[in-house]
Image: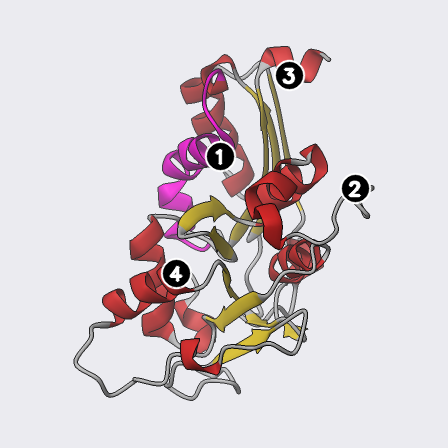
Amino acid sequence: MTYSSGISGDSNANGGTSATRVTADTDTHQDFQPTSKGSDMSLQDIVAQDIKENPVIIFMKGYPEAPRCGFSALAVKVLQQYGVSITARDILSNMKLKESVKAHSNWPTFPQIFINGEFVGGSDIILSMHQKGELKDLLGDSAQKGEQDSAQ
Amino acid sequence: MMGSRGTSVVLSRAARMRQKLQSALEASALDIEDVSYQHAGHAAVKDNANETHFNIKVISPKFEGQNLVKRHRMVYDLLTDELNSGLHAISIVAKTPTESGS
């Protein structure tokens, strides 16, 4: 509800669950993409399953290639330091998805990052964990590199 | 437009935030910086909105033993009314007196 006034005229709004997937290699998993908009699962269930099935998932404004908020852009940039596959969902294009994610995490702002099914936080926390070296531990074996850009 | 009414408002959002955070967190340091101008024209910000984006740096003994998610939740919880009334995003640095002293 915080942003409701500006969303209705959003040129990206399409009412569907827009999704994009960024991978560090070519071994993508298309079957993980949520295509079941018309299924009998509630959006709340879809969000929970999405988080469970994707080791690194970010709910953000825009897409990794075209973030629509500086905080989302920053979080993507940090995660990309580690060469891990990142699943991204654009919450600006789907108001219901946005509210479902907020309800799921009980966190008021975006981006929201979940790693291995656990809520990690927003851009401040992901940046702080990156700078302290904690993000590398959390990402574990998936992290091929890291700590490259601890400045800032 | 941006900044034109900042000084004339009886109690700005920044001032309300300061009051809420200061009293509840017993902050030993509290910096609140309005960075709304950086986000003017943002996808979700109305043209006439101001006081939408803030950087908050707070040092509080109440953060002791709390991880970052819990610290941020404490701040968000205190600012629920603001988040529901046009506050768009806040960047939070939340430290304990011990951590800030190093």
Tell me if label 4 and label 3 are in contact, CB under 8 Å: no
Q: What's the CA distance linking mark 4 and mark 3?
A: 32 Å
Q: Secondary structure at mark 2?
A: loop
Q: Earlier in the sequence, mark 1 or mark 3?
A: 1
The answer to whether residue B68 is left or right of residue A25 is left
Residue at 41 percent of width and 31 percent of height: B74
Q: Secondary structure at mark 4?
A: helix
Foreground pick, B41 / A23 = A23
Residue A130 point in image, percent of width and height:
67, 42
Chain containing mark 4: A
Please tell me whether residue B81 belongs to the stretch shown in magenta.
yes
Tell me if label 3 and label 2 are in contact, CB under 8 Å: no
Tell me if label 1 and label 2 are in contact, CB under 8 Å: no
Foreground pick, B83 / B13 = B83
Mark 4 highlights which residue? A51
Q: Amino acid at mark 4?
A: Ile
Foreground pick, B10 / A68 = A68
